[in-house]
Amino acid sequence: MTSLLCIAVSDWHGRGTVASVNRVLYGALRIARLHHVIARQFGERMQYVMAEINGEPGLLRYIDGKLDSSISIVTDGEKILAMYAVRNPDKLA
């Protein structure tokens, strides 16, 4: 994953009604670690589906078949420049 991330990439989950990262993460390694920890925590219970989110490429993350988050991805065509995750159930509905 780190090879796809730009060194200056940021990941923002925001604050809301569910547990999430409460500050912007910077750097490919930090973001890759976060997603690795999430994958280890949920294992096969987690599934990603590619989607278009607000005109940008993105992923929908499902845990136990329930939509957990949407992740929009900003890219330059080769590297991921930023990732924005929404976990608020009211905004995902």
Image: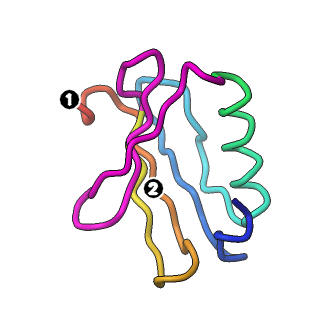
Q: Quadrant of the N terminus?
A: bottom right
The mark nearer the N terminus, 2 or 1, is: 2
Up the image or down, 3 lies above or below 39; here it is below
Q: Is residue 62 left or right of residue 2?
A: left
Residue 47 among magenta residues = yes
- Total numbered circles: 2
Residue 15 among magenta residues = no
Up the image or down, 65 lies above or below 48; here it is above
Residue 44, image quadrant: top right
Q: Residue at x 39, y 18 (%)?
A: 65
Q: Nearer the viewer, residue 38 or 65?
A: 65
Tell me the tag on residue 84.
2
For the residue marked with disc 1, what is the amino acid?
Answer: Ala
User: Of helix, strand and loop, which one carries label 2?
Assistant: strand
Residue 25: x percent and y percent?
66, 56
Up the image or down, 77 lies above or below 42; here it is below
Question: The magenta stretch spans which residues?
Answer: 43-68
Up the image or down, 10 lies above or below 84; here it is below
Which residue is labeled 1 in the image?
93
Question: How is the protein colored in the picture?
Answer: rainbow
How many residues crowd mark 1 within 10 Å: few (<14), some (14–19), many (20+)? few
Q: Nearer the viewer, residue 40 or 8?
A: 40
Q: Quadrant of the C terminus?
A: top left
Residue 31, image quadrant: bottom right
Q: Residue at x 53, y 53 (%)?
A: 12
Residue 86: x percent and y percent?
39, 42
Residue 26: x percent and y percent?
69, 64
For the residue marked with disc 2, what is the amino acid?
Answer: Tyr
User: Of helix, strand and loop, which one carries label 1?
Assistant: loop
